Image: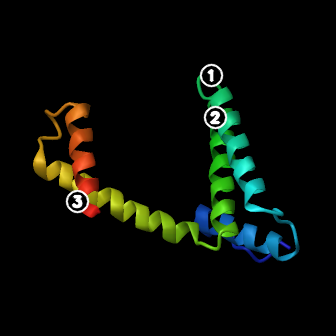
Amino acid sequence: ILDGIPKTFPAMLRAEKIIKKVTAVGFDWESVDGVLDKVQEEIQELKEVIHGDEKEKVQEELGDLIFSLINLSNYLGYSASDILNKTNKKFEKRFRYVESVCDINKSSIEVMEEKWKEAKSLED
């Protein structure tokens, strides 16, 4: 089933293709609640290892969480790549606003967060 998915694809695209192939043969969740439960499970597993010093375990659990989120995106009928691109643009626009209204190198995190909220409110 997974043959034909190039190993050279970027990781997110490869995950999307893997998920589409396996769901096409019925290896899928019965409801969105199942996918959301899986995401929560992966968050919990990440919480359990994140403060330890096993970097490989943290990376594994973080990878499982990312894969689960890509799976959720697919389940909802969205491209995770497209969604992430939109989020990147939104983040960049907001951060550029923060940069334009305060000195990033001298401002406290509280000031930057206030300006971030300001940028958000300008979008509404």
Measured Cα–Cα span from mark 3 to mark 1 = 40 Å
Q: Which residue is mark 3?
A: 122
| 3 or 2: mark nearer the eye | 3
The vertical placement of 31 against 43, above or below, is below
**Mark 2 vs 1, N-terminal side:** 1
Left or right of 67, for residue 82: left
Real-space Cα distance between discs 3 and 2? 37 Å
Front tag of 3 and 1: 3
Would you identify the image quadrant in which residue 96 lies? bottom left
Q: Earlier in the sequence, mark 3 or mark 2?
A: 2
At which x and y percent is residue 27? 86, 66
Of callouts 3 and 1, the N-terminal one: 1
Amino acid carrying label 3: it is Leu
Q: Amino acid at mark 2?
A: Val
The quadrant the N terminus occupies is: bottom right
Query: In the image, is residue 96 above or below residue 19?
Result: above
Q: Residue at x 70, y 67 (%)?
A: 75
Asked whether, in this view, residue 89 is left or right of residue 66, the answer is: left
Q: Residues within 10 Å of mark 3 (few under 14, many from 20)?
A: few
Q: Which residue is mark 2?
A: 58
In which quadrant is the C terminus drawn? bottom left
Residue on which disc 1 sits: 52
Residue 66 coordinates in the image, percent (x, y): 62, 52
Q: CA distance from mark 2 to mark 1?
A: 8 Å
**Mark number, residue 67:** none
